[in-house]
Each structure stands twice: as structure tokens, then as C-alpha cells.
């Protein structure tokens, strides 16, 4: 596990300040020993398994937590926290079915708009974060790898975002307030206001990234 720290130092030696860690294959964020090591070297960490990332960590169906504290009152790791930012990839091969590019586009549209019930009065409470992996012009490549999408599908998704007023952010624009135990959005122009920690529901946004395994956020 010391290699977690060495990786950040290696990047720093090449001029890259990397405050956010991504768990390989989405493994490790539920292991207290691994989270403890990650926390020594990184400010934030990202994993998968949720189509929406809630600013206050209070909207996940699998969790009853009310803020983004790393640990619950009984000492267990919370489902979502600063070392477990929830994101998701689109996998077109699932449960033995290979979804076509048009079917995947419909899933993309649905997820991008899943934010709507959570955004109110100009405040943002949640962000769908999506990770892209591989682009291809070959349907053979598409059909052989669940996380690979076609260049045409990617272009169609980006056009949908552009034409429908979505706003793309970088994941490094997500910050964490350790006093309020909630996330916030930074360096946005015009500024974006997140839902306060006392709000009864979380607002939602959507996220997407145009490069290999680099997630970003899309606000609508």
C-alpha cells in the first residue's frame, strides 16, 4: 500500500499535483485499512457504482447517512464520503445482453436528466459523474469490451449535452468542506451554489468526460 503515496510523488515529480485518487477497478473504498492509507496522501478519492453523486451524501438508496463524514457514529465507513466519491461508467454488456449504441444513447439521456428532481431554485445538490474508458470506430471492438463505446456514440452524447444546455465541469472542481462534512463546487463561472447541509433533499447534476478514464461533471 505505500505505492499509493509513491504514485502521487511520481506525478508531482513530473509537474502534476494530483489531489484525487481513483480506486483501480472500483476496489478498496469499503476497506478501512486502504482508505486510511489513501487519506494520508490524497484529499479526495473516487470509486464507482452510483449514477448520481450527492453533494450532501444524503440521497443514496443504499445509505441512510445525513452528511459526508468518512465514518458513521458506530465507527463504520460511510457508503459515500470524501474518500468514496461515487461515479459510474456505462457498460453496454450487462447480464448477458449487449446493448446497441442507440440503446446506450437512451440510457445516457436518462441518466443525464435524472438530476432534474433534485435541482431547485438554482442550487445544486448532486452530480452524475461518468467515466469514459475507450473509444473505437470498430463495432468488433465495441462488441468485445463492455466499457468501449463508438466514436459516433460519444459524439452524439456530447452533442446532446451541448444542445440541451448542460454544463461540463472537471472533477477537480469538486471540493470538500470538513467543517460541514459536505462537498461543494469551486472555480465555476458563473458561480454555482450547492444545497446547504440542512436541506431535506439533494440536488443533482450530471457528469461526463471526453478522455480515457478521466471523469468530469456536467451541470444542467
Image (cartoon, rainbow, N blue to C red):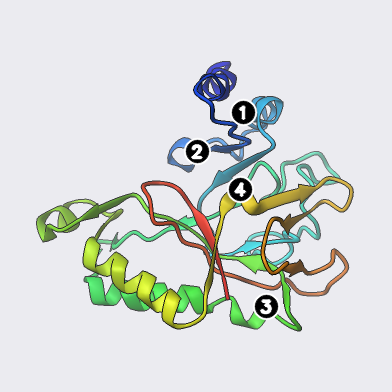
User: Distance between the Cα atoms at labels 3 and 1?
Assistant: 32 Å
Based on the displayed image, in which of its 4 quarters is residue 90 positioned? bottom left
Contact between labelled residues 4 and 1, with CB atoms less than 8 Å apart: no
Q: Earlier in the sequence, mark 3 or mark 2?
A: 2
Q: Earlier in the sequence, mark 1 or mark 4?
A: 1
Q: Residue at x 41, y 46 (%)?
A: 213
Q: Judge depth for marks 3 and 2 and give the one in front.
A: 3
SS of the residue under disc 2: loop
Based on the displayed image, in which of its 4 quarters is residue 104 positioned? bottom left
Task: Identify the mark at residue 172; answer none if there is no mark.
Answer: 4
Task: Identify the mark at residue 27; answer none if there is no mark.
Answer: 2
Q: Earlier in the sequence, mark 3 or mark 1?
A: 1
Task: Identify the mark at residue 118; answer none if there is no mark.
Answer: 3
Task: Residue 113 in the image: state x and y as whole percent.
Answer: 51, 79
Q: Is residue 117 above or below residue 37?
A: below
Q: Badge 1 is on which residue?
A: 34
SS of the residue under disc 1: helix
Task: Residue 86 in the image: state x and y as whole percent.
Answer: 58, 54
Q: Judge depth for marks 2 and 4 and give the one in front.
A: 4
Amino acid at each position: 500500500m505505500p505505492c499509493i503515496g509513491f504514485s502521487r510523488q511520481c506525478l508531482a515529480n513530473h509537474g502534476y499535483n494530483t489531489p484525487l485518487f481513483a480506486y483501480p477497478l472500483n476496489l478498496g473504498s469499503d476497506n478501512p485499512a486502504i482508505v486510511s492509507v489513501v487519506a494520508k496522501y490524497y484529499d479526495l478519492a473516487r470509486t464507482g457504482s452510483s449514477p448520481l453523486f450527492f453533494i450532501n451524501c444524503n440521497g443514496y438508496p443504499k445509505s441512510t447517512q445525513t452528511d459526508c463524514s468518512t465514518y458513521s457514529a458506530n465507527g463504520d465507513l460511510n457508503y459515500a464520503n470524501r474518500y468514496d466519491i461515487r461515479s459510474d461508467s456505462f457498460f453496454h454488456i450487462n447480464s448477458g445482453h449487449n446493448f446497441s449504441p442507440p440503446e446506450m444513447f437512451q440510457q445516457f439521456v436518462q441518466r443525464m436528466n435524472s438530476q432534474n428532481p433534485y435541482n431547485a431554485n438554482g442550487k445544486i445538490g448532486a452530480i452524475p459523474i461518468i467515466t469514459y474508458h475507450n473509444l473505437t470506430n470498430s463495432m468488433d471492438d465495441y462488441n468485445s469490451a463492455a466499457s468501449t463505446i463508438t466514436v459516433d456514440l460519444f459524439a452524439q452524447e456530447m452533442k446532446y449535452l451541448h444542445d440541451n444546455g448542460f454544463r461540463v465541469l472537471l472533477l477537480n472542481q469538486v471540493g470538500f468542506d470538513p467543517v460541514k462534512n459536505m462537498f461543494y463546487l469551486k472555480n465555476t463561472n458563473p458561480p454555482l451554489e450547492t444545497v446547504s447541509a440542512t436541506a431535506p433533499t439533494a440536488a443533482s447534476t450530471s457528469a461526463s468526460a471526453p478522455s480515457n478514464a478521466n471523469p468530469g461533471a456536467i451541470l444542467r
